[in-house]
Amino acid sequence: MTDIHYIVSLLGFANLIELILLAGGFIAVCIASTGYTQLIDSYSNIIKYNITLTSNADSTSFYDIDTYIIKQADQAILIIIFILTLITFLSHIIFSLRYRYSWHRFSNTIAFLCIIYAFALCGVSVVVACWEDKLRKRLTNIYLNNQLINTPNGYVKPHIGSAAAAAAFGFAACLIFVVEALIRLRHLADKIQT
């Protein structure tokens, strides 16, 4: 017996929002260009391509992380959480988990997973937000005007705001996962089930 009504339940709605936000974050981080940041990561490239850095460019420890690693880490975390959330969502529907005897134990386990997902998304989103901030602060006019830079790999365009959008999707998904964890731990979904 399948539980098709899970889709319109409070938890099902939260799962759908999470899946949309995770997919949006993945698309945004895939669009984000690492080319600009790789140029400003090395001083020799700054001289070679005549990039002028702003004098008041403050720096954090997150600025030292290679952008390609940030992009790969964000993509990996988003895909893993997306797949696990999709499996959870489909399991609720296919196996009618809300009507099983072990529902409360299963729901509490999923709640703790949601908290882990939220911490992972928050952490990677902070680093991705620093990636956008690094571009904005260090390249100022070139970045804000969306100018092309000619490099050995061709022309590079920064795609303004895509890293910030990826971070925003990550923070929003983090918030929804926390809400889902609270719903599960407080058994709020149990009270409105039919």
Image: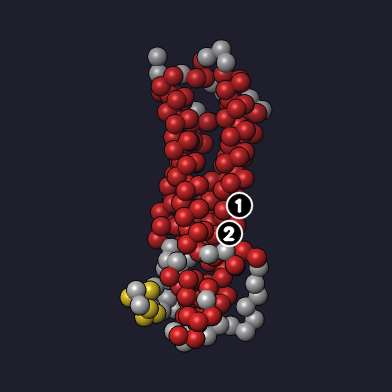
- Asked if 18 appears above or below 146 in the picture, the reply is above
Residue furthest to the top in view is 101
Whether residues under marks 1 and 2 lie with C-beta atoms below 8 angstroms apart, the answer is: yes
Image quarter of residue 155: bottom left
Residue in the image at 62% along x and 45% along y: 119
From the top left corner, tell me how far across and down residue 70 is, in percent.
Answer: 52, 58
Q: Quadrant of residue 33?
A: bottom left
Q: Identify the residue shown where x is 49% and y is 41%.
A: 81
Q: Is residue 46 above or below residue 119?
A: below
Q: Position of residue 47 (x, y in %)?
A: 49, 86
Distance from disc 1 to disc 2, alpha carbons, whole Å, reads: 7 Å
Residue ID for mark 1: 123
The answer, for residue 179, to whether it is visible in the render is: no
47 or 23, nearer to the observer? 47
Binning the other alpha carbons within 10 Å of mark 2 as few (below 14), some (14 to 19) or many (20 upward) gives many
Name the residue type under label 1: Gly
Q: What is the x, y in percent for residue 31?
A: 40, 61
In the image, what residue occupies the spot 50% across and 64% down? 67
Name the amino acid, label 2. Val
Q: Residue 45: x percent and y percent?
A: 47, 80
Q: Describe residue 184's horizontal placement relative to residue 156 as left or right.
A: right
Residue 87 quadrant: top left
Q: Secondary structure at mark 1?
A: helix
Residue at position x 62%, y 63% in the image? 62
Q: Say whether residue 128 is visible.
A: yes
> Is residue 110 found left or right of 7 in the rendered image?
right
Mark carried by residue 127: 2
**Closer-to-camera residue (150/28):** 150
Task: Say which element carries label 2.
Answer: helix
What residue occupies the far left of the structure in this picture? 154
